[in-house]
Image: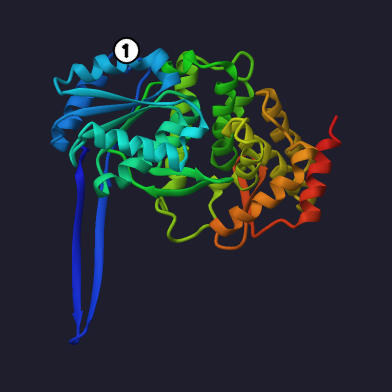
Amino acid sequence: MSTSPPASRLAVDVEGDDTFTVSAHRVDTYRIHLAEGSTEDGLSSQLAALAAQLGAPEIVIVIDTGAAEHHLGAVTAAVVGTGLPCRTVSVPAGESSKSPRGLKNLITALRTHGVTRRTLLLGVGGGVVCDLVTAAASLYMRGVPYALVPTTVLAQVDAAIGGKGGVDFGAAKNLLGAFHHPAGVYLDPSLTATLPDRQIRAGLAEVIKVALIANPSLFATLEKSADPLPTGQAMTSIVRHAVEAKLLLLSPDPYEQKDLRRPLNLGHCIGHPYEAATGYRILHGEAVAAGIAVAAAHTFLTDESTTLEDRDRILNLLAAYHLPTTIPDKLRDTVWEGMDTVRRIRNGPLHLVLPHRPGHCTITDDIDRPSYDKALNDLAARP
């Protein structure tokens, strides 16, 4: 299947003299390439082919300062190899760039560089860059093409997959954003070898999430891969299975139009408020892990078919990767208050995803304050 520009059409049905029924149809088709070492071997030819299909006159690299330290040379060489003009926009590393100010700064830089409607943006970095570039590409000139080279585990298995862009607003994670699918995604798991262990563990929290939802075999693989952390082909295999699982989970409703009860929100209804409550000092994956732990405890306490062994298998895997398995008491109230923002985003109910055991999750409408406290107390009582 070849990548092509979005196909779109408009169907109009005239009903009587004063009613028009309008149906807009759009298809986004793109490839996700996954290969270890592909940044230095193959990325240039892939970008050249993509730029030719898009009619892109140039490529602008948008890269965070952390990724630039390790990967800017290889990515720049790949872009220069396309024969197209190349420019670079640097984004400060860290969650603070994923903000209205960070979005404004990026759009200002694109305008200063004279980016056109057909310029191909190439986002290089972690989840912040993937989210920020997606959001900026959706807004600038009502939509410009972009591709992603995610350099962290979390970005490769989550942020770069699905076409969702967003920025934080105040204490609300991803309150602003848009759906805008990329023209291509290039996954090179070898890029994650430069990450500190903490970043790798946090990224694997998102893999634990999709394994819990839909892939018991991947869950079992993760149980065997915590010490030492996976590298090389082992990491490539984990990324491949995680991406496949996420795409299958997204496939019924990629624009979140039909149902806000989404299994992929496992850990996020509580994790997002926890992340914000710390002032984003903890990593996104760490916050998601804590949210999974609270949901697992609540499941055990409210569902007779979920055993203590089921709960502990989930919590033990999180602990094996040195991920949080509770929320500090001093943040308990702040996180609870932050969950009200998630309720508004979910259109009222929280739609809390409950993990029973690998491959089996359910969704409950909400959790009340006594049950929330009881789950945290249950986690605190563990040896």
Amino acid type for the residue under numbered disc 1: Gly
In the displayed structure image, the side of residue 95 where residue 269 appears, left or right: right
Front residue of this view, candidates 49 and 1: 49
Q: Which residue is mark 1?
A: 73
Number of numbered discs: 1
Q: Quadrant of the C terminus?
A: top right
Question: x and y percent of residue 182 in the render?
Answer: 31, 39
**Quadrant housing residue 33:** top left
Front residue of this view, candidates 218 and 83: 83
Q: Quadrant of the N terminus?
A: top left
Front residue of this view, candidates 198 and 353: 198
| Residue 217 shows up from this direction | no
Front residue of this view, candidates 199 and 303: 199
Q: What SS does tag 1 mark?
A: helix
9, above or below 152, in the image: below
Q: Residue at x 69, y 23 (%)?
A: 320
Question: x and y percent of residue 242 in the render?
Answer: 48, 33
Residue located farthest toward the bottom when viewing the structure as drawn: 16
In the displayed structure image, the side of residue 381 where residue 143 appears, left or right: left
Question: x and y percent of residue 295 in the render?
Answer: 69, 45
Question: x and y percent of residue 89 in the render?
Answer: 32, 26
Q: Residue at x 60, y 34 (%)?
A: 280
255, above or below 241, in the image: below
- Counting other residues with Cα less than 10 Å from the Cα at mark 1, is it few (<14), some (14-19), or many (20 or more)? few
In the displayed structure image, the side of residue 286 where residue 77 appears, left or right: left
| Residue 94 shows up from this direction | yes
